[in-house]
Image: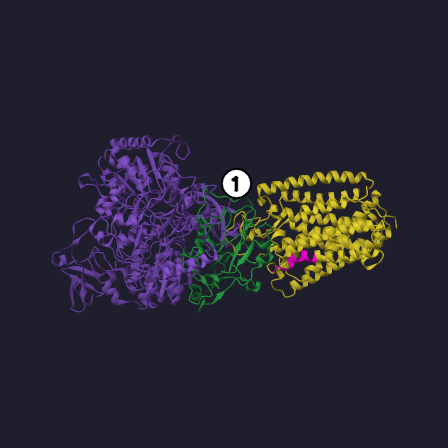
Amino acid sequence: MTRYVMVIDTKRCVGCNNCSMTCKVENNIPEGIWWSRSVTDGGEAELTPRGDSPDNMYMRFLTLACQHCENPACVKVCPVGATYRDEATGIVRQDYDKCIGCRMCMAACPYTGVRSFNWEEPKYAMDFATGDIDVPKHEKHVVEKCTFCYQRIAKGEVPACMELCPARARHWGDLDDPESDVSKALAGREYAQLLPEMGTKPSVYYLV
Amino acid sequence: MTENVSTAGAVKAPSAPAKAGKGATVGIVVSAIVAAIGIALWMVQLSGGMVQTAMRNLDSWGLYITMFMFFVGLSAGGLIISSVPKAFGIKGFGGISKVAVMTSIAATIGAIAFVVVDLGQPVRMWELFAYSNLGSPLMWDIIVLMTYLILSCVYLWAQVQNEKGKVSHVALRVISVIALVCAILVHSVTAWIFGLQQSHEMWHTALLAPWFVSSALVCGTGLVMCTVIALNATGYLKVARENLVKLAKLLAVFLLVDLYFFGCDLLTEGFPAASGMAVVDMLVSGPLAPFFWGEIVLSVVAIVLCVVPQLRTTPLMVVAGICAIAAIFCKRAQLLVGGFQLPNIDLPAVMTPFTVTNWEGGMAQAYAGMVYWPTPLEFGIALGVVALAFLVLFLGLKFLPLKPAEQE
Amino acid sequence: MEEIKEGKGTLTRRGFFKTTAAVAGAAAAGTGLVTMAAHAASPTKGLPDEQSFVNTCRGNCGGKCVLVGKVREGKLVQTRPYDPPEGFERSRMGCVKGVTYPQRLYAPNRVLYPMIQRGERGSDNWERVSWDEAISYVADKINKAQAEYGPQSFGLWHSYGSEGWLNGAYHQSTGVGYHRFLNTFGGSVIIPGGDQAQVYMGFSVVQHGTNSTADYTNAKTLIAWGANVTETVRCSWPFICDARDKGARIFAVDPRYTITASGADTWIPVRSGTDGALILAMCNFIIDNDLMDKEFLAKKSVAPLLIKDDGQYLRMSDMGVPPTEGPLNPWTGKPTIINPEVVFDQATGELTSQFVAQDPALSGEYEYEGMRLRTVFDYVHDKTKQFTVEFAAKECDIPAEQIEDLARTYATNTPSTIVMAQGMCHHVNSRHNYKDLAYLASLTGNIDRKGSTIYLNKNHVNVEKTTLVTREMYPDPSMMKPYTPVCSERVPEILETGKLGQNDHPLKVIMIVSANPFASESGRQRYLETLKYLDCLVTVDCFMSDTARYSDVVLPVGLSFEQEDFLQISAHEVDFLMQKAVEPAGEVKSDFEIYNMLAPKIGLDGLYDKDAEGYLRALLDNEENKKIGRTYDDFKREGCIADWSEEPAIGTENNATRRVQFYVPHIVARDIAYTELPEEEKIPWYEHAMEAYQDNPLREKYPFFGNSEHSNYTGHSMYNNIPWLHEIWGDPYVMIPAKAAAERGIAENDMVRVFNDRGEFVARARLTDGLRYDSIVIPHGPQQDAYPVGHPQDLTLCYSDLTGNSSYNDFLCEVEKWEGGE
């Protein structure tokens, strides 16, 4: 079995959003939609810390996208199976042509904001599609989200966000393979997963 | 949903022509116009995009799903009021049984319509039957709602036939038992759409299903009370005052049960003084306080009006019924918005017009007040759906033999 | 149905595993010399009509990342940073901006045709004209001005906006088109002010050595000093992280708690503009506590060199030993003169050449033929001992213990590196910092050693490089005329007075290339108010920039992926041909073509004897490159050629003294209006900033120290109007300390007015606890359209110090809630 996972090193991540932007362009994501975002764990506003003296300031970054859970809440609730888990890869996929737009999956997903709905006809600043030609066409009134760049994985490439991280904070690979980059990255480091209490068993690991 | 409409229509066919009341005719015309406007607005929503609603990614459900919950509640109340006496063979509330079922049918159609207007791709609804994921609570609800609608129609038909002597009391009793079970189920399943989601602190409670039943009884009883009094006033049917008093007392009991559940829930959320405290704070003193206190005050008023004999005048009983319905609406709004009001991940990040309703000021400002408030378009469409439900009710009142066979 | 349509057959399960396995096998084999053969104008793995090209974003950040652009149906649909081969992931390039390049290329505010302003400057009253008409118009203005006022009346003004050996415009660096032109017309060359305190003082005056970024991994103490590398020099971050993983202690010296500070162990919230005081206090603490590396100081720095009363070095020629000739100077073509400085050798007890002495004395008074001599160290120490820890604690507003901890750690937990970008470069007093840093590094031996340096931004200096025939950049010597370099911060004064220093210098026609000074140099209001003295302003730009909008003529120029060029990279050491990927938009031309059109019309016939490809071939097709396969044709085929290495490279001193110079007796001003310089300019020194200092009475009115940031999302003014970036970053904001904002009734996202006597601007407020109580951070990059009122550079000083530096952070201001605009 292959179980693709991402490992993200929060000690190295600087919240630069290069991954988010690469994702946006690669997948020709419409205006106003972001499958991947860098969130600031710090003060109330982005890129600000919390703390009341220079000695105790705190700011960290987390890149947040679909967690491709092993026990996905979204898959269970989709009434028509438009969101489903690809057992061969562990990737949670979304079939735009099947989605009825009920947004049950969005309500069910504990990871706030990783799923997005196209609230209108997708809009683009330019009149041609950017990125990979194999990316499926975006549709109005359906739910979409990170695909782990399925179109790239199918060609033997890694997700677009992975290979461009300037901080070298991102790792990708098969967790079932002990020799993979991710298995090595996880070995010997403390890691966390988002909202483990939800029992979703995410495929994204954060080194802390 | 066309199937349902035609099922509803099927009820009409065998019905004996009733004396058309002038009021019903006016009601039909007015509600048909409003419903038509609603459908036109729905077309606007579909063509221009749901961006015209206030719903956004972080508050992805809104008024429609609130109203869905609310209408499911209304629907069950009527049926339970009607079926309990028959099921248990006890004395009922006078000749209101058929009217009560008719309100159920109307409310169920309204509830289904609210789900439909909430869908992004309503033309793909056929997939619900082609690719049913039987593990999805939403799928359960769709199945149960369908069954419930059909069963309500059958139950109504059975009552009519029973009056004509064509259906035995035993058969009617069997049907009423099934209808009763289904009514409880429809509430439980609707509750499970929310209650089975671990993602939302406010929704994730085992209490939600029974609580939904109790809330349904409150607003259903309130609705039946108001309808009956209104029909009484127009002379459509004659209901003895003692039956109204019975209804009022029952309403008070249901309200107390509902408040009891609320109390249990608040205590469970708040007692550990942990994450659940956020729910309590949000309700008691936070953005949802108006709806929380609204529910409490309206419930208390309704209880007082129902239990103090001197206050049980007909107009005040209408007030009590409306208060009860409004209280449950407040509950629904709390539940829906409350589910989204407490995001699991509220860390600041990129905000776009699609992120959350009030996105411009960042996460903190988006959640400072109510995270969601509907747009006029949503109110318009919701009004249209409500009108559709009324249209069904008026059509039933006008064309179906809902009057008691003989005044009890 | 599926995410991939039926028929392409790429996503069947079998194909899925097969391709995965194949690539894993291929990846293991690829190391060493890597080329971009797969990308160079050949079909990729996608559809047959997709082609890839190599180029760069030309974002003026110093990074010069190689971007691989994908072209589909004639459109550039994607730009991704070139990915280094396996094993060199730390050398990754790219940032969030480069990925958005397609939106930059197809931006609606690009200038597509030559345009002439028919109304007032800045009125946006443009008329489209033909290239012929535009060039004739400009040539006419230049010819008239030169006839009436002399050659100096025409000024060619550049900054760092574009690069490339053909089309770039770096003064004394790249650009065949630009250099042939400027060395021939004999007028004024206006040189930029941005970052010049560092660029001029560090590289031209102090001339210290630098290690490669990879060497950061060897440091035990790293001080990110005014350097938010995580947003501005990302390529260094992985190396800093690696050092941190090995236990290095990281400090961040910055008024703001930056992202870099969040990755550091200690944040030192120094008051901006007081870095010099902190450095000198560290020096004195190190001297007073005997934490010096005396051997390094004596053998590797100018400390033991003996100076005379006039401050000049005693040289061997003063002792009767005649100078000798050294190797040729590549710039002048003349031999260097070797005339060694003299030290007192304690081994022999004699005065001798610094290159001969075994044990140079650091201290002591000496005499030679009646001349009183003292060591540089004694002299400098004597002059600077007034800058004590106590002084700095007050000046910098940080605890004395923190300064002592910083100094002790830097001196003892060695090797230590100061990671420096341009943060301490934006005040009028900044020019001193680079002598101060050289002094600090010399005292502790923290320079030119493994793990020890005082700069960043140089990566792998030891790799084999392409040899360029740079003489192609210059015209035939018979055509060359001298030009007058003019610092841009001096321009308003020249326009107003007609004088440069004491000399008449009428400036009537200016052509701005590769620059957007009205958005990116400090003192914008002074520029705009003195434009009235100018007969004609021509801007060559890709966009309708702030500068273009105030011009009389705008000439549209292409972006990088629209033209072929060649680039060598400073931060990544990858040489590549900038390949033309798409047809130029509208009627845009390359810089090279524009010079070609203009030159003959202003009397510079025969200036360009080759076409664009001809010059690229002339630059590249030499014997050295043929040997290592780096000719034009090689690059044309491969696109990008790199010899990857992450081996740390250690700097050496290549200046005349061959020692770390913290004393610069021969300093010459870059701004030629300064003819004499006081003693303090030659030694490590601190003086308070010109306007932004704590005791300035003006602070009663304007209490805030202003700082501008270089955000991750802006490339100076070059990445504006990119919808993707705007979505992610939003409108420009002013960072205000939360407490100060509360006192002023300012809430998050309120629109606020930032103002002083020079100007104002309005932007939204972002409140933070990670900023000194007396400081705000203003945006840098977004242009005037992004603000409802004014422009951040309206608040800044227009002042030219000896380096002509733009002093972006040397201003005071106040902030209030903005009530307008509703």
Q: Is the stretch drawn in magenta largely helix, strand or loop?
A: helix
Drawn side of residue B114 relative to residue C114, left or right = right
> In the rendered structure, the residue with mark 1 lies on which chain?
C
Drawn side of residue B27 relative to residue A40, left or right = right
Viewer-proximal residue among C464 and B316? C464
The answer to which quarter of the image holds residue C102 is top left
Taking C717 as reference, is B139 above or below it? below
User: Mark 1 is on which residue type?
Assistant: Gly
The answer to which quarter of the image holds residue C603 is top left
Letter of the chain shown green in the rendering:
A
Indicate the colouring scheme. by chain
Taking C185 as reference, is C14 above or below it? below
Q: Position of residue B70 (x, y in %)?
A: 70, 51
Q: Magenta segment, which residues? A: B187-197
The answer to which quarter of the image holds residue B399 is top right
What hue does chain B carry in this figure?
Answer: yellow
What hue does chain C carry in this figure?
Answer: purple
Q: Position of residue B62 (x, y in %)?
A: 63, 49
Residue under pointer 1: C821
Drawn side of residue B61 relative to residue C561, left or right = right
Using the rendered image of the protein, determine whether residue A158 is visible from the camera's viewpoint: yes
Residue density around tag 1, few if under 14, some if 14–19, many if 20 or more, within 10 Å: few
Viewer-proximal residue among C258 and B73? B73
Using the rendered image of the protein, determine whether residue C330 is visible from the camera's viewpoint: no
